[in-house]
Image: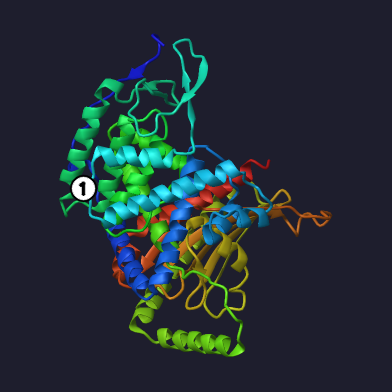
């Protein structure tokens, strides 16, 4: 250890807003939050409760997956989020998680509910509650792993709710040792962290996302507990955002690497990547709650079903005429045109690159479809699935379009697809998502009996609401949209390269 490079721990410092980059993404997030708030008002109290429980279950599952506490596949995750943490649900899905994991999920869910109750009671944050939160989150974890001075691995009891008594530094990817706050300074540093947070939280000019990112990183820097610090940090982020009336932010498995990288950059003094990531994740969280809970009809009376259908059709026709929908439709058309322009430009750019290299047999085709087109439904199932990865329900009722690039080379075909659709039903929110499919080229490999198909969805999306100014979406946020499209294509081409 003596020859290893160390990054010494630093005391908690106040937030320096001069180092925080401000752009249109936070303003766009606020517009989305307003739509979300209005959408929730249209629900019954029972529906709002069910929606919130769904969000908490997702956070409960993903916070443990981030820590590698267990592994639950995405399909089972969606079922547990929708239906709850019951043994009946697990057994119906093939019993793919054991009782210990199920109890851990329940402990984490109950702890998050405790956070919401803390906010509702308007209690002042203090270190006693943070200790209580740690104890609740880790109640099913009896031990944790430590290493002695000789590097030997040992399993020791976990002190629930107690500050650490041994250093818990970590090794970064470059081999350097990142030091967290020494045990003897934890109590004073946690007091200072809470004090500074309360000071920051009282300033209305600081955006809640910035407050949450600063507090989250500050807590991680102290690392006050022997284990479970990440879970507590994410629960405290819920506390900050719920206090300011935002949806529960979920750091999911798809963003794990981005999350760890953003924390690492913050360790070097730049909080902006973490703020940007939290902005994207909060957008996912808000969009994810723009979906009414599905409940089974009780009794199954045909008259009740008919009344429900009639009500839905009536509401559909009414909302098609609203000013909100007209505004959203015009903005969607502008974004659609921007996407198609980007795809046409990339089509020509890729053709030029292959031509310059003397490769003439690569076929690149641009295609698109909009509302009313006969081929508008081509990618519907894939769009629904990719939207789930991006964190929302895809709605094709009022406006939907897609654009694609098909690249055929060496018996393979890459389809890179971007979709523009509603995020949640009748929510006033639109989303752009991307995904890529690599499959056997039907025109070049007719001998293949069982063609393979490999699909991967982009974890991020671009969202806008009807209340945003059109110029803001197309001009001010153009870079954000272009980056989403470019990142998706870059990842798709990289995957194609690995096939050769």
Counting from the top left corner in percent of width and height, residue 214 is at 27, 42
Residue wearing tag 1: 124
Counting from the top left corner in percent of width and height, residue 25 is at 31, 56
Q: Is residue 253 left or right of residue 93?
A: left
Quadrant of the frame with the N terminus: top left
Q: Nearer the viewer, residue 405 or 273?
A: 273
Counting from the top left corner in percent of width and height, residue 361 is at 68, 52
Please give the name of the residue rendered at 34% of the width and 50% of the height, measured from the top-left corner.
115
Counting from the top left corner in percent of width and height, residue 420 is at 48, 67
> What's the coloring here?
rainbow
Residue 72 higher or lower than 165, as above or below: below
- Tell me the element at label 1: loop
Please give the name of the residue rendered at 37% of the width and 33% of the height, measured from the top-left corner.
264
Residue 289 seen in the current view: no
Q: Is residue 457 left or right of residue 164?
A: right
Q: Is residue 493 left or right of residue 1?
A: right
In the picture, residue 30 is in which quadrant? bottom left
């Amino acid at each position: 250890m003596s020859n290893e490079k160390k990054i010494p721990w630093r005391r908690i410092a106040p937030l320096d807003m001069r180092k925080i980059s401000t752009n249109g993404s936070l303003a766009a997030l606020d517009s989305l939050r307003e739509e979300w708030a209005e959408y929730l008002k249209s629900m019954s109290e029972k529906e709002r409760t069910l929606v919130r429980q769904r969000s908490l279950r997702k956070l409960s599952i993903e916070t443990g997956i981030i820590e590698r506490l267990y592994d639950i596949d995405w399909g089972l995750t969606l079922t547990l989020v929708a239906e709850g943490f019951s043994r009946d649900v697990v057994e119906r899905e093939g019993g793919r998680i054991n009782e210990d994991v199920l109890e851990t999920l329940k402990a984490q869910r109950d702890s998050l509910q405790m956070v919401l109750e803390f906010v509702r009671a308007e209690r002042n944050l203090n270190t006693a509650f943070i200790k209580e939160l740690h104890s609740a989150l880790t109640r099913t974890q009896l031990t944790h792993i430590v290493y002695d001075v000789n590097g030997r691995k040992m399993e020791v009891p976990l002190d629930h709710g107690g500050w650490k008594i041994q250093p818990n530094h970590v090794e970064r990817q470059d081999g350097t040792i990142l030091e967290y706050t020494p045990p003897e300074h934890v109590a004073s540093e946690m007091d200072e962290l809470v004090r500074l947070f309360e000071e920051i939280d009282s300033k209305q000019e600081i955006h809640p996302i910035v407050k949450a990112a600063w507090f989250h990183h500050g807590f991680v820097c102290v690392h006050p507990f022997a284990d479970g610090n990440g879970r507590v940090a994410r629960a405290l982020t819920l506390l900050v955002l719920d206090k300011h009336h935002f949806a529960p932010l979920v750091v999911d498995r798809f963003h794990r690497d981005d999350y760890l990288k953003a924390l690492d950059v913050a360790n070097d003094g730049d909080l902006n990547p973490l703020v940007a990531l939290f902005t994207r994740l909060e957008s996912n969280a808000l969009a994810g709650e723009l979906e009414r809970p599905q409940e089974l009809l009780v009794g199954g009376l045909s008259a009740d079903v008919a009344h429900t259908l009639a009500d839905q059709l009536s509401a559909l026709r009414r909302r098609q005429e609203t000013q909100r929908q007209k505004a959203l439709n015009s903005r969607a058309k502008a974004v659609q045109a921007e996407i198609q322009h980007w795809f046409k430009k990339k089509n020509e750019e890729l053709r030029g690159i292959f031509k310059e290299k003397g490769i003439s047999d690569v076929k690149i085709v641009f295609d698109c479809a909009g509302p009313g087109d006969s081929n508008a439904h081509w990618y519907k199932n894939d769009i629904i699935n990719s939207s789930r990865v991006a964190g929302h329900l895809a709605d094709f009722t009022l406006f939907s379009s897609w654009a694609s690039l098909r690249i055929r080379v060496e018996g393979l075909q890459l389809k890179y697809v971007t979709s523009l659709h509603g995020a949640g039903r009748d929510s006033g929110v639109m989303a752009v998502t991307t995904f890529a499919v690599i499959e056997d080229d039907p025109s070049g490999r007719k001998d293949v009996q069982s063609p393979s198909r490999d699909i991967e969805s982009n974890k991020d999306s671009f969202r806008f609401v009807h209340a945003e100014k059109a110029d803001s979406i197309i001009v001010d946020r153009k870079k954000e949209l272009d980056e989403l499209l470019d990142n998706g294509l870059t990842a798709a081409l990289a995957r194609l390269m690995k096939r050769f």
